[in-house]
Image: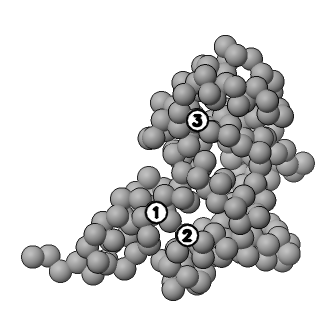
């Protein structure tokens, strides 16, 4: 009855639903399984590793006993975070192993994770507290527009951005490496739009 030509979602949590609706309605869109591999942090880390791209040491679990056993063996500091959530909610940095604190952080992260999975990954410090970020528009599998920015993170809480620079402050080499990685991920997941 409605003549729908397309559907668009611009926020992480909407991407899977948008992909599924487009797929079911025969509209242009991305493969729901590919989107799933991009927006779930644990699946995305697995994808990066399988493609030979840079990836911090990580682990993930939906149960605390398994998570604790895996995390006990990792190199600290670690970042504990929900596998599926955005906006830095439920994210915390742990400097060393402490079972009581880990349980508290696990439960907090799990409460924000839509699938109940919690990730731990090696914290990679930045000497300048600056992180490079990219937003892109993709058409037919190729990047047709990009928005590169530099987020400067607060030295007292390195997980929270405190300043944003537009355009991003980066070398041409950094940009080329980033776009190469982005295109590999899009190719592997069948991302077309």
As measured in the structure, the alpha-carbon distance from the residue carrying label 2 to the one carrying label 3 is: 23 Å
Q: Identify whether 153 is placed above or below 191.
A: above
Can residue 157 be seen here?
Answer: no
Contact between labelled residues 3 and 2, with CB atoms less than 8 Å apart: no
> Could you tell me which residue is drawn at 71 percent across and 31 percent down?
70
What x and y, as percent, mark residue 74? 79, 33
- Looking at this view, is 47 or 90 the one in front? 47
Report the residue marked by disc 1.
Answer: 33
> What secondary structure is found at the residue carrying circle 2?
helix
Q: Circle 2: is it few (<14), some (14-19), or many (20+) Cα within 10 Å?
A: some
- Numbered badge on residue 61: 3
| Left or right relative to 92: residue 124 | right
As measured in the structure, the alpha-carbon distance from the residue carrying label 1 to the one carrying label 3 is: 20 Å
> What secondary structure is found at the residue carrying circle 1?
helix
- Numbered badge on residue 189: 2
> What secondary structure is found at the residue carrying circle 3?
strand
| Badge 1 or badge 3: first in the primary sequence | 1
Q: In which quarter of the image is the N terminus?
A: bottom left
What x and y, as percent, mark residue 60? 62, 39
> Could you tell me which residue is drawn at 37 percent across and 80 percent down?
28
As measured in the structure, the alpha-carbon distance from the residue carrying label 2 to the one carrying label 1 is: 8 Å
């Amino acid at each position: 009855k409605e003549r729908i030509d397309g559907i668009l979602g611009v926020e992480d949590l909407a991407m899977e639903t948008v992909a599924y609706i487009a797929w079911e309605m025969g509209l242009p869109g991305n493969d729901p399984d590919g989107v799933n591999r991009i927006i779930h942090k644990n699946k995305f880390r697995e994808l990066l590793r399988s493609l030979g791209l840079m990836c911090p040491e990580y682990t993930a679990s939906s149960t605390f006993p398994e998570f604790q056993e895996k995390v006990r063996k990792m190199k600290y500091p670690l970042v504990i975070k929900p596998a599926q959530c955005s906006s830095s909610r439920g994210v915390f940095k742990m400097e060393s192993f402490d079972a009581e604190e880990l349980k508290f952080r696990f439960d907090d992260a799990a409460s924000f994770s839509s699938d109940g999975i919690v990730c731990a990954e090696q914290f990679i410090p930045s000497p300048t507290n600056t992180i490079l970020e990219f937003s892109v528009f993709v058409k037919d599998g190729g990047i047709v527009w990009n928005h590169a920015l530099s987020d400067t993170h607060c030295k007292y809480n390195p997980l929270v951005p405190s300043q944003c620079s537009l355009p991003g402050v980066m070398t041409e080499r950094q940009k080329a490496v980033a776009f190469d990685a982005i295109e590999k991920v899009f190719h592997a997941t069948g991302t077309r739009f």
